[in-house]
Amino acid sequence: MAGNYVDSLESYLGCDSIVLTELSVLLPPIITAFLDTTINKGSSVQLGVVGADSYVWTPNYSLSCDDCQYPIASPQVTTSYFVEGSFEGCSSFDTITITVNDIYTFLWIPNSFTPNGDLLNDEFVIAGENIKEFKILLFNRWGELLFQSNNIGNCWGGFYKGKKVPSGVYVYKVEVLSENSENIEKFGHINLMR
């Protein structure tokens, strides 16, 4: 217990001594970590903690640093980070859990279509899920741009400048930014059969 203490000591030769002792008890620091949060897979978040003068984070993988106050975390799976904060030789602990949403980006691009007016497979249609941004460019075999769109719902019906293009192979480039901030590029061929 903290306080002042007085002790009397007597040596074997009969000499008395008085010893004054002041005892201080340091309390552990009270550290407070930022709140738990949720991110999408592929994203990062800044962690943080206050209340001490040095810190150690575990586990240390997917962290920008493991001995700083504000590391950047980029976990690929839900992870609980434990932080030990120290002040004047005493330590305390707290935890932050980062929940990772594993968003799967689905992108389906057909390899052919038949714009013949029978209402079956008449348009080049791309389907997808968990897509934040989309862009398609469609070219003929000479590299001439025939169609472009930033809307995944826009379809190409096999026309260029109001005229039907002939049956053949056309080239596409698709660029997607997924909900988890992943950049996806697809190149390929589409067969147009009338």
Image (cartoon, rainbow, N blue to C red):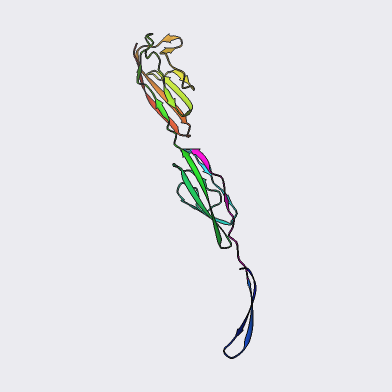
Tell me where residue 157 appears, x and y as whole percent.
Answer: 42, 13
Quarter of the view holding residue 111: top left
Image quarter where the N terminus lies is: bottom right
In the image: residue 42, left or right of residue 33: left
Q: Nearer the viewer, residue 45 or 32?
A: 32
In the image: residue 63, left or right of residue 14: left
Tell me where residue 50 appears, x and y as whole percent.
Answer: 59, 52
In the image: residue 123, left or right of residue 35: left
Identify the residue at horizontal 41%, vertical 21% (top origin).
Answer: 126
User: What kind of secondary structure does the magenta stretch mostly adopt?
Assistant: loop
| Residue 145 vertical placement versus 48 (above, below) | above
| Residue 139 vertical placement versus 178 (above, below) | above
Q: Nearer the viewer, residue 103 or 21?
A: 21
Identify the residue at horizontal 40%, vertical 15% (top origin).
Answer: 123
Q: How many marks?
A: 0
| Residue 141 among those drawn in magenta | no
Image quarter where the C terminus lies is: top left
Tell me where residue 11 appears, x and y as whole percent.
Answer: 58, 87
**Residue reaching furthest front?**
1
Q: Which residues are magenta?
A: 23-39
Tell me where residue 100 appears, x and y as whole percent.
Answer: 47, 40
| Residue 50 vertical placement versus 110 (above, below) | below
